Amino acid sequence: MKRYCLALDLIDDAALINQYEHWHAPGNIPPEIKASIKNSGIIGMQIYRTANRLFMIMDTDETFSFERKADMDAGNPYVQEWEKLMWQFQQPLPWAAAGDKWVLMDQIFQL
């Protein structure tokens, strides 16, 4: 198992943040999105929030790669629609490369 941690910002607007959290509440994520996550080799995913900053933890199996996930997502109309919806609430980190959303974080400590 490999773990990845990523960060992204939400637009700093309380109403938009509430809507984003609503979409991520239990039972609100479409089954097609859950399936696309699992089919890519992600075996566990958690998202945490502080203010408008999001922190995602992904645990993956040996089949996962960011390239494979991107290819799968590009061909999935459900994922494309979901990403379009989510982009209404999200904004890139100031240091993100053009076109990047979630930014991979570097581990700097482990106990």
Image (spheres, helix red, strand yellow):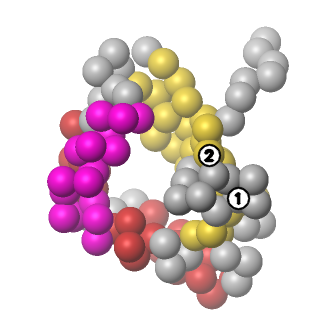
Disc 2 is placed on an element classified as: strand
Looking at the picture, how far across and down is residue 33, in whole percent? Answer: 27, 56
The residue singled out by tag 1 in the image is 93
The reply to whether residue 31 is in sight is no
Whether 89 is among the magenta residues is: no
* In contact (CB < 8 Å): disc 1 and disc 2: yes
Q: Which residue is drawn at 55% across and 76% down?
A: 89
Q: Is residue 68 above or below residue 86?
A: above
Q: Which mark is on residue 103?
A: 2
Identity, as a three-letter code, of the amino acid under mark 1: Leu
Farthest bottom residue in view? 15
**The N terminus appears in which quarter of the rendering?**
top left
Q: Which mark is on residue 108?
A: none
Does 105 sit left or right of 42 as displayed? right
Q: Residue at x 22, y 37 (%)?
A: 39
N-terminal label among 1 and 2: 1
Does 63 sit left or right of 10 as displayed? left
Q: Which residue is drawn at 67% across and 76% down?
A: 11
Q: Is the magenta stretch mostly helix, strand or loop?
A: helix
Disc 1 is placed on an element classified as: loop
What is the magenta range?
Answer: 66-81
Looking at the picture, how far across and down is residue 22, in whole percent? Answer: 48, 74
Query: In terms of depth relative to the viewer, which is nearer, 108 or 31?
Result: 108
**The C terminus appears in which quarter of the rendering?**
top right
Q: Residues within 10 Å of mark 1 (few under 14, many from 20)?
A: some
Q: How many angstroms separate mark 1 from mark 2 (CA)?
A: 8 Å
The reply to whether residue 94 is in sight is yes
Does 44 sit left or right of 109 as displayed? left
Q: Which residue is drawn at 58% across and 70% down?
A: 90
Q: In this view, does 87 lie above or below 57?
A: below
Looking at the picture, how far across and down is residue 48, in whole percent? Answer: 63, 51
